[in-house]
Amino acid sequence: MAGYSPSKRRHGKHDEIDLPLIPAMSLMVVLVPMLIQTAAFEQFASMQLNLPSSDVVSYVESPSMAETADSISLALTRQGFQIISEEATLRKIPLRGNQFDFESLKGALDDYKRGAYSRQTAIILLVEDGVIYDDIIHAMDVCRPFFPGVSLADRISG
């Protein structure tokens, strides 16, 4: 009785396939470090704020006339800066092109700190709608060397 010849599949004598992995590995060795180097990692910046506690109720008295006369405010409007004291505009610093003139503001604040407002340690920023966040933060940074107590308020139109 003649038998069948053994199949190639059962004995593993089929053709072997070589996968060319060397080029793919070389590509990964180059691409992975490059992707890691060019990845944009998030950077966070923070500002320290001292906010009142919500569980403690405190009543603030209205400021005296002397305190009001000594106070100074900086309004950020779409036309530029306005340095204000007791509802009177001390100085207007218009926009330079389409941007705020921070150098002129720095000079004006230095003048006021050396002059009539030498005892003042705080300034209030009155921000009008439409002023971008970056300009507000830059204005706070310009004010801090002269008036360390920087506060924010809404611009009151009247």
Image (spheres, grey):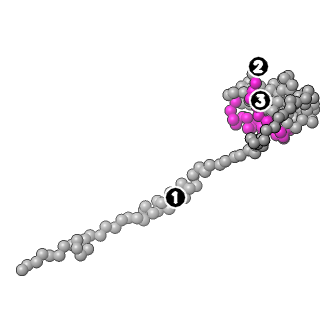
Give the position of the N terminus as an image quadrant: bottom left
- At label 2, the amino acid type is Gly
Q: Secondary structure at mark 1?
A: helix
Asked whether the residues under the numbered discs 3 and 2 touch, taking CB atoms below 8 Å apart as contact, a structural biologist would say no
The quarter of the displayed image where residue 33 is located: bottom right
Instruction: Name the residue rendered at 69%, 27% in the picture.
Output: 129
Instruction: Name the residue rendered at 91%, 32% in the picture.
Output: 117
**Nearer-the-camera pick, 57 or 11:** 57
Q: Secondary structure at mark 2?
A: loop
Residue 84 x/y as whole percent: 83, 26
**Nearer-the-camera pick, 120 or 63:** 63
Residue 71 x/y as whole percent: 87, 30
Distance from Cα at disc 3 to Cα at disc 1: 50 Å
Q: Which callout, 3 or 2, points at the residue further toward the start of the chain?
A: 3
**Disc marking residue 32:** 1
The residue tagged 3 is 126
The answer to whether 40 is drawn above or below residue 110 in the figure is below
Residue 3 shown left or right of residue 69 in the figure: left
Distance from Cα at disc 3 to Cα at disc 2: 13 Å
Q: Which callout, 3 or 1, points at the residue further toward the start of the chain?
A: 1
Find the magenta span and give its range: 131-156
The residue tagged 2 is 158
- At label 1, the amino acid type is Val
Q: Are there few (<14), some (14-19), or many (20+) residues within 10 Å of tag 1? A: few
**Nearer-the-camera pick, 69 or 31:** 69
The answer to whether 57 is drawn above or below residue 80 in the figure is below
Q: Are there few (<14), some (14-19), or many (20+) residues within 10 Å of tag 2? A: few
Residue 158 shown left or right of residue 7 in the figure: right
Q: Is residue 77 visible?
A: yes
Number of marks in picture: 3
